Each structure stands twice: as structure tokens, then as C-alpha cells.
Amino acid sequence: MPEGLTAMDAMQGANSSTVTGNRGLVVEEPLIFEMDSPGKTAVDLPPAPNVDDRLGGLRRKAAVGLPGLSEPEVVRHYTRLSQKNYGIDTGFFPLGSCTMKHNPRLNEKLARLPGFADIHPFQPEQTVQGALELMHELARWLKAMTGMPAVALSPAAGAHGELCGMLAIRQAHEHKGDARKVVLVPESAHGTNPATAALVGYTVKSIPATDDGRVDLDALKAALGPDVAAFMVTNPNTCGLFERDIIAISQAVHDVGAYVYMDGANYNAIMGRVKIADLGVDAMHINLHKTFSTPHGGGGPGSGPTVLSDALAPFAPLPFVVEENGAFRLVEHVKDPACAAAGKHPFGRMKGYHGQFGVFVRALGYMMSMGRDGLKQASDDAVLNANYLYARLSDVLTPSFPAPVMHEALFDDRFLKDTGVSTLDFAKALIDEGFHPMTMYFPLVVHGALLMEPTETESRQTLDVFITAVRHLAEKAKSDADSFKQAPRLTPRRRLDETLAARKPVLRWSPQTEG
Ligand SMILES: *Cc1c(COP(=O)(O)O)cnc(C)c1O
């Protein structure tokens, strides 16, 4: 807890001087169990008829322990809880590396169409031809956009897509009888990259970054050898920079018989602009939930289709959709004749069933409504907005690397030097100004990082208000460190122990812990 805050202050908002604990119309919300009035109920059920008890030993011996509340109490409780949520629908969410952009409602509507929403993966194929056609069509769009010959739709998130690509790479090496042990990962990679390589059983070796935030090509070349299975590179990278040397990188990696995995989670910055195949990439996942309009960040389903080059396409996982004689069919087994016919040696499968279908619907809806030109425009605008933030904030914050940037602008904490204000304090003060903070302390290649990704869906007006707030705080940090230590002042809760909350979350309520 920051100095100057009492435990009570930390628990309650700054203006906790009200009798009720409510502030303005923001109401203190107890747990539903704490609101319990035994015997109260929202529905009037007639007494149960006298029937023979067939429960035997299964008869409940104690009360269920559900709280008793009236209907209006229940309605208010859950409505207020829903209003405590902060999301992209409530305000600007400049979380770097996360692409928190608006999700057009049209795609939500499509995903909820009964013909899509109410189907089951066990339904006979002839009853879900439309769904299979949608997957086939989505695959076609992804292949056309990236110029890659194959795509595995089933990975359920970005990191899962990385796993898919790395398993295909391992399978390709093993197929050649080549047991390579090492995967090279640059310093500026997303944390999931080395984690994925390690999970697949590889030894991870780090490649340093140059002073301009990119892969050090000479260091990479020096580390390449016959033991290297793959190089994993995030591009645009987590500093918001395009890896200008990517073609030379791919060439050098291929020269030693290794494969290039490109983390495509930041595809929003280059879609419609760059043909991934032209970069020499062998595998890349696309975060449909980031780039192609699925609400994310709240733990909902993601989807990480992985596009594969000619060299890796034969090893793509099951299942995949094929079109035969005008009908669509899922290939689910290695022994399926469609595998042999296409020279495929699938490495297995990524998950049960066929992928995150609801996300597929949204993604294809987004692509079709945007069109080829619209997708390109979206990435152009995302890059423009990031460069606008960069340009308008560079004189008060300290940019880590020279412009231009891609989808996000990276600053470090040099502008806070000797102020006594930390990156964390600065982010907390932004909350009082009505903004969700940017990503903090990531990427690790710079000290005290502040990473902002505005996306294309924010207006000039919104960005200008944000810029005004950040500029004001940067000025204030020079003279009033104490106010930063107190921030946030206006939230229902102040500084919480985030580490403790993540490590030891209290997820159960029991009467013993009441009070
Ligand atoms: C978000 C992200 C990932 C991981 O994606 P998930 O869907 O969260 O698993 C990987 N790499 C980068 C660069 C990302 O931004």
C-alpha cells in the first residue's frame, strides 16, 4: 500500500466520508450472500405436494445455502455488478499488444443467428453444411490475405496457434528424421513465444535486440546452425516496430534448414498491406479475436488459426474441411483417404471438436463487411492513430525508439526520472482521468514500459482527450509526486494488492469468513 493511505482509505474510495459508503450514484455493493434475508424469495412457489420420497440417502440434510432476496434486489444487484465492468464498450482501452478495438454489432448479430448458434458438433454433417461452408470460406479468406497455402482453424487462441505451428515444425523435422533441439527467440518476442517453444520440448535461446528495437541480424546469423529447429519472431514486434529485415531473416533461417514462425497477433497493423508468404514465413497464427472483431479480454473464447507454408502444410492438424462433389466434409482421421490423396501427415489435433465456431462467424462477417479495401484501410488507420499518439506525446513522455511505429507506441519511464513517480503510479492516475491504463512494464526490453495501442476505431476526439490527460499528468509528475501515490482516488476501490489477488484469489464465500 502506498504511503499516506490508511487501510480504510485503500479499501474505500477517497470520498468515503458518506454515511452509506455510496458515492454519488455509485453504490457500495455487498456480495449477494451478504444480502441474504432467510426466507425471502423472488418467486412464490406453492408448497411441494406430498409425494413418496425416492431420494433415499441422497436427501439433502442441510439447507442449500442460497441467499434469500426479492426480485428487485436481484435485478439491482446484477445490474450494478454489470456496471462495474470496464470494457471497450464503456471507454478508451489503449492496452498495448491487445488490440482492444470496437467489435461491430453486426458480427454479434450474425454469430447469434440460430442456424449458427444452436448447432452441435455431433450433428450429422449433412445437417451442418452451411457451417462447414463458412469454415471453408473463412479458410479461403485467411489463405488469400496471407498468400499462404494452408490454414489450421482449430487453435483456440493465439498461444494455442503458436503451439500448432511449432508442433507442425517439429513434425516436419521428425518426418525428415532430423531431431533438432533449439528454438531461437528474440528479446522483443511476446512472452508466449519462448513458453510455447519450451512446451514443445525445445531449448530456447534468446537473440538480442539492436538499439533500434529490432532483431539483431548478425547475432541471429551467429546463433543459427544445424541444431536450430526454428526462429520465432513477433512481427510487428512488441515494441510496435516492423522487423525490416524479415526477408533476410527468413533467408538465413532457411539456409540452415530451420523454419520461421511469425507471431501474427499484431496482424491488425499489416492486414491487407503485407502478404505473409512473401516474407518467407513458414507458420503464423492470427488472433481472430484481436484483429477480426470478437470481444476479448474478459476470458471469452479466442481463436488462433495458423497459416502454414508449402513446407509445413502437409503436417497441419486434424480436422479440416474439404469440398467434395459440391458438399463439405470434415476430415477427422489420419486414415481418411483425403489425407493420403493430399500427401498429408497431420501431427494430431489441437482440441476436441472443430474450433471456436462463434469466433469464425464473427471473423468472416467482419471480413466480408469490410472487404479487401476496408481491411487495408483499418490497418492503415490503426497505424496512423498509433503514430498520432506517438507524435503528440513524444515531447512529454520518452519514446523508446524512433518513429514511425506500427500499431502501438512504446514509451519508457525516463520522463519520470527523479520525480518519485513510477510507471504504476502514472497508470493509476490515468484511471482517475477516466482512462483504462495502457500496458505497463511490457515489453521487458525497455525500463518501466508504457505501451499504447489505440487501434483504428478510436476517433481523433477521443485520442485528443487522452493526450490532454497524459500531457497534464506528465507535467504534474514533476511537482506533485504525492498525488500519484494516492491514485486512484475516485474509484470504488483504491490500490489493491494485485499480486496477492492473482496468486491467492478468494473465490469462495462461507458463513465462517463473513465480516
Ligand atoms: C495476444 C498475443 C499473444 C497471445 O494470444 P492469446 O490469444 O492471448 O493466447 C501472442 N503474441 C502476441 C504478440 C500477442 O499480442
Image: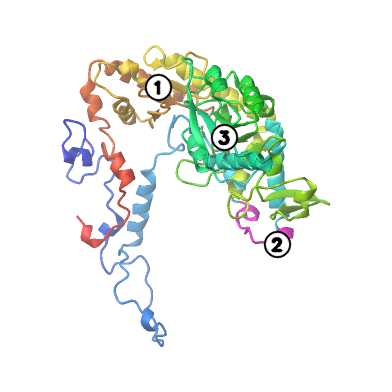
Give, as a single range, the part of the protein colored magenta.
113-127
493 lies above or below 380: below
Q: How crowded is mark 2: few (under 14 residues within 10 Å), some or many (20 or more)?
A: few
Residue 193 location (% of width, % of height): 51, 35
Q: How far apart are marks 1 and 3 (CA)?
A: 26 Å
Can you identify the residue that label 2 sits on?
124
Magenta region includes residue 116: yes
Residue at the disc numbered 1:
446
The image position of residue 433, as x and y in percent, is: 33, 28
Question: The disc labelled 1 sits on which kind of residue?
Answer: Val
- Is 468 on the left-hand or right-hand side of 138? left
User: What amino acid type should be assigned to the residue bearing mark 2?
Assistant: Pro
The Cα atoms of the two marked residues, 1 and 2, are separated by 53 Å
- The answer to whether one can see residue 274 in this image is no
Name the foreground residue: 76 vs 434: 434
Residue at (38%, 77%) from the top-left corner? 46
Left or right: 341 in relation to 176: right
Where is residue 20 drawn, in percent x and y? 20, 46
Query: Which of pointers 1 and 2 lies earlier in the amino acid sequence?
Result: 2
Q: Is mark 2 on a helix, strand or loop?
A: loop
